[in-house]
Amino acid sequence: MPDLITLEWIRERDTGNELQDTDSSTLQDAIIVISAWMIQKIGHDFGSLENYEEEIDGYPSKRLPLTGRTRYPLRSISRIMIDGVNIPLTRIVARTNRRINGISFIMHKYQIWDGWTVSILGSWGYEEIPDDIQEAAYRLIKNKIIGNPLDKVEKSVKHPDGISVTYALEDSTPRSMIGSGDQYVDDIIANYRWKESGGIV
């Protein structure tokens, strides 16, 4: 399982020198822990783009979802076969999820996928670790070492007697149920998440 970020990346990104007194061993331990946690939440790792063929079961629709049904996100398609029969790619529409630059579903123009075994030959995964994934890892590492959420949300209310009170809101994110303590990180993980109905975890 590859680390999502390096010591060098952290030192360069830490423009406020908030981690300058943190020794490399502590940082490396945090990198390992945070990388493993994020990969587990997302459902796949990063750092390798592979060309191979993967088989998945059909689906009762012209639209065949891939999210959570393959080991990695699909980046490009070379060939599609249904029960061993080659399907011209002109009959296929591939819909790219622009947030993660991966194909989230493929659609057959003329028939449904139900009852068939679909073989997809293409490029899968990510050759490089996306910048937003690295930034999310950095934020969690900084949070872990400093011990405070980076973006603690506060709310102010004014009582009828004129007294104003400010208090911190809950740091976890009920909407996504990811609960990193950082809304930015939760949103990034939710974008790349690949295991709604399976995945490699």
Image: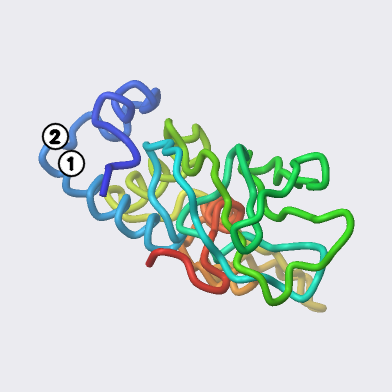
Q: Residue at x 60, y 74 (%)?
A: 174
Q: Residues within 10 Å of mark 2 (few under 14, many from 20)?
A: some
Give the color scheme: rainbow, by chain, secondary structure or one colour. rainbow
Q: Do we see residue 3 in this rendering?
A: yes
**From mark 1 to mark 2, how far is it between C-alphas?**
6 Å
Could you tell me if the residues under marks 1 and 2 are in contact, i.e. CB atoms within 8 Å?
yes
Q: Residue at x 54, y 60 (%)?
A: 194
Q: Residues within 10 Å of mark 1 (few under 14, many from 20)?
A: some
Q: Do we see residue 184 in this rendering?
A: no
Q: Amino acid at mark 2?
A: Ser
Q: Residue 192: horizontal and vertical position, in percent? A: 56, 52
Q: Residue 112: horizontal and vertical position, in percent? A: 81, 68
**As drawn, is 33 to the left or to the right of 97?**
left
Query: SS for tag 1?
Result: helix
- Tell me the residue that label 1 is attached to: 28
Q: Residue at x 42, y 44 (%)?
A: 139
* Residue 113 position (above or below residue 3): below
* Residue 118 position (above or below residue 104): below
Q: Residue 153: horizontal and vertical position, in percent? A: 59, 58
Q: Residue 163: horizontal and vertical position, in percent? A: 71, 70
Q: In the rendering, which numbered label is found on residue 24?
A: 2
Residue 173 location, quadrant: bottom right
Q: Amino acid at mark 1?
A: Gln
Q: In the rendering, which numbered label is found on residue 17?
A: none
Query: In which quadrant is the C terminus drawn?
Result: bottom left
**As drawn, is 114 to the left or to the right of 72?**
right
Query: SS for tag 2?
Result: helix
